[in-house]
Amino acid sequence: MDLTDELFHNSPDGDRQDEQAVIICLQFPIGKLQQKKALDAVFDLDDIFREIVESSHVGRYDGHEFCEGTEEESVTFYIYGKDANKIYQKIKPILQSLPSLQEVSIIKRYSQFYENIIQ
């Protein structure tokens, strides 16, 4: 896995909000997360992200979410803080230590999401 600091994100220039985020999505073939070893690895990674974020004080770890699609399964991890670049620099070594991961998406978000409610 080749990790770069040049990630897709919305512009780091201009108006930033107080809360930024790093969102990590790991994609797996269907059924992979039904295997105990793979599921245990996800929970271990959850613990590692939580420990790194909390001990470095770069933000707060908001947990993970499983998603099951027709062609793949995924796990998304959410980390929030004041500086997405600092968060990413803290977790990047962990992601680099996982060379067997083939499908990884990392998003650095520099502004808050706004939910549109349609009535």
Image (cartoon, rainbow, N blue to C red):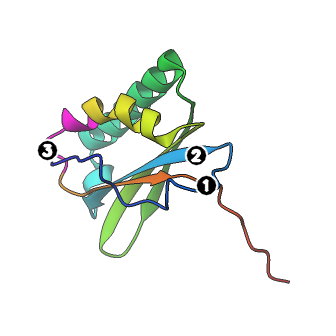
Q: Where is 99 relative to 70, above or below?
A: above
Image position of 40 with respect to 30: above or below: above
Residues packed near mark 2 inside 10 Å, few (<14), some (14 to 19) or many (20 plus): many
Q: Residue at horizontal 43%, vertical 22%?
A: 52
Q: Are marks 1 and 2 in contact (CB under 8 Å)?
A: yes
C-alpha span from label 3 to label 1:
31 Å
Say which mark, if any, is on residue 20: 2
- Residue lying furthest front in this view? 14
Q: Secondary structure at mark 3?
A: loop
Image: 16 above or below 82: below
Report, in whole angstroms, how far the alpha carbon at label 2 lies from the one at label 3.
Answer: 28 Å
Write the start and end of the magenta stretch as one range.
Answer: 95-101
- Residue depth check, mark 3 versus mark 1: number of the one nearer the observer: 1
Q: Amino acid at mark 3?
A: Ser
Residue visible at 58% across and 36% down in the picture: 81
Residue that label 1 marks = 111
User: Which is nearer the eye, 75 or 5?
Assistant: 5
Which label's residue is closer to the chain start, 2 or 3? 2
Which percent across, then down, holds residue 89?
Answer: 36, 33
User: Considering depth in this image, is 36 or 119 the residue closer to the camera?
Assistant: 119
